[in-house]
Image (spheres, helix red, strand yellow):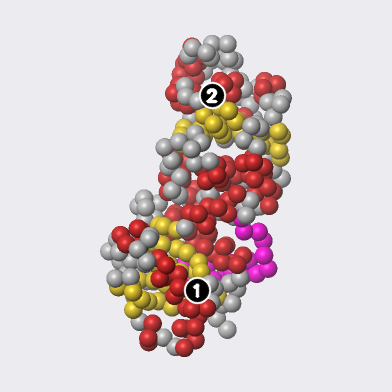
């Protein structure tokens, strides 16, 4: 028995074309079965991905005039996917993975991929997809062949294999990628304690950067007016900006930049999240002059590290830290870090994702 089946229909002026030619079983499936669906505009190249238990009814809702993207995207085709595996957990999983892969596949075309942010991004706050029976089968028997045997031959995607996409940073650090229970619980705790500062310690491969993107998504979702600063290393600045832009989180209240740039801007933030906090600079003679110039800014003259300055700029500070990483002479020392974070909540990530 096939592990999945699809129904492909044309869409014209918001109406489904070709339903009358389907079998009775296919018609019933469209009305009553769990399904993942993908709309596509041949001319616009735009895509919308969703899930439903009643596709016919869901289609009518999309085209009832209340959803602008369905009025302007010029969708003219839809594929509806059914599978023997499709319980609620499996559908959440497949939907999130397809969105992630489509985003990476369309990374150069901003706005090409749409989805229900309220539904999907909401799952980053601790309600992420957990492991479920048959998850490996869903990946190998549904997602992989769907992409490589259905979507690629039809010209719906640019990458012929998923292997091409899995190494891309948009996939590795996607803010809708599934979290571990440990990550989900930690995000929920941070969201519910905005007056508490955190150090999140984890070795390489424990998912600190994935946690960071999910955390930003959750904060922007729960507190849309919060001003959020994300401090990253220079080599990740453009990547970080692109990830948040692609996934619809390019809020005017969000800044993704380096420590030196955010300090030079000298603004105040509700939340400052620092990736690789062990690489923050301290006062040190033998370093690039730009790093030392920040200590001449009024109010920061008595500070001895970038971390001290950031603490003055943010109401809530969240630091991603790896105690095992080598510390260079110009980096904040472990002793300084411990003193400055003495009152912080210390959390540890244990799950290793690297094989």
Is residue 290 something one can see in this rendering?
A: yes
Which residue is at 50% across, 66% downward? 51
Magenta residues, dominant SS class: helix
Percent coordinates x, y for residue 213 in the rendering: 54, 44
* Mark 2 residue crowding within 10 angstroms, few (<14) / some (14–19) / many (20+): many
The N terminus sits in image quarter: bottom right
* Mark 1 residue crowding within 10 angstroms, few (<14) / some (14–19) / many (20+): some
Percent coordinates x, y for residue 111 in the rendering: 37, 52
Q: CA distance from mark 1 to mark 2?
A: 49 Å
Residue under label 1? 54
Percent coordinates x, y for residue 327 in the rendering: 63, 26
Percent coordinates x, y for residue 341 in the rendering: 68, 26
Is residue 353 something one can see in this rendering?
A: no
The answer to whether residue 284 is magenta is: no
**Relative to residue 174, is residue 332 depicted above or below?**
above
- Return the mark for residue 313: 2
- Which image quarter: residue 86? bottom right
For the record, the magenta segment spans: 128-147
Which residue is at 45% across, 58% downward? 115
Q: Nearer the viewer, residue 254 or 170?
A: 254
Q: Nearer the viewer, residue 354 or 299?
A: 299
């Amino acid at each position: 028995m096939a592990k999945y089946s699809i129904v492909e229909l044309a869409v014209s002026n918001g109406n489904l074309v070709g339903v009358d030619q389907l079998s009775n079983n296919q018609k019933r499936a469209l009305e009553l079965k769990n399904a993942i669906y993908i709309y596509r505009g041949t001319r616009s190249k735009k895509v919308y991905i969703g899930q439903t238990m009643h596709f016919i009814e869901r289609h009518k809702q999309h085209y009832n005039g209340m959803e602008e993207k369905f009025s302007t995207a010029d969708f003219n085709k839809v594929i509806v996917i059914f599978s023997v595996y499709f319980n609620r957990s499996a559908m959440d999983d497949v939907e999130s993975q397809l969105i992630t892969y489509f985003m990476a596949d369309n990374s150069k075309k901003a706005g090409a991929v749409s989805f229900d942010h309220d539904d999907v991004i909401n799952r980053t706050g601790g309600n992420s997809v957990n492991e479920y029976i048959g998850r490996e089968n869903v990946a190998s028997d549904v997602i992989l062949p769907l992409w490589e045997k259905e979507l690629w031959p039809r010209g719906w995607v640019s990458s012929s294999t998923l292997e091409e996409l899995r190494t891309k940073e948009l996939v590795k650090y996607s803010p809708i990628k599934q979290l571990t229970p440990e990550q989900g619980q930690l995000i929920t705790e941070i969201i519910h304690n905005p007056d508490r500062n955190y150090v999140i310690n984890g070795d390489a491969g424990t998912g600190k950067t994935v946690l960071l993107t999910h955390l930003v998504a959750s904060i922007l979702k729960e507190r849309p007016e919060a001003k959020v600063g994300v401090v990253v290393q220079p080599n990740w600045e453009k990547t970080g900006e692109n990830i948040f832009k692609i996934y619809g989180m390019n809020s005017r209240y969000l800044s993704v930049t380096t420590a030196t740039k955010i300090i030079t801007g000298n603004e105040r933030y509700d939340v400052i999240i620092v990736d690789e906090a062990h690489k923050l600079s301290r006062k040190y003679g033998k370093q690039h002059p730009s790093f030392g110039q920040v200590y001449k800014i009024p109010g920061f003259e008595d500070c001895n590290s970038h971390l001290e300055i950031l603490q003055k700029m943010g109401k809530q500070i969240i630091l991603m830290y790896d105690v095992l990483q080598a510390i260079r002479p110009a980096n904040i020392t472990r002793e300084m870090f411990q003193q400055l974070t003495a009152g912080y909540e210390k959390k540890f990530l244990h799950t290793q994702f690297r094989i």
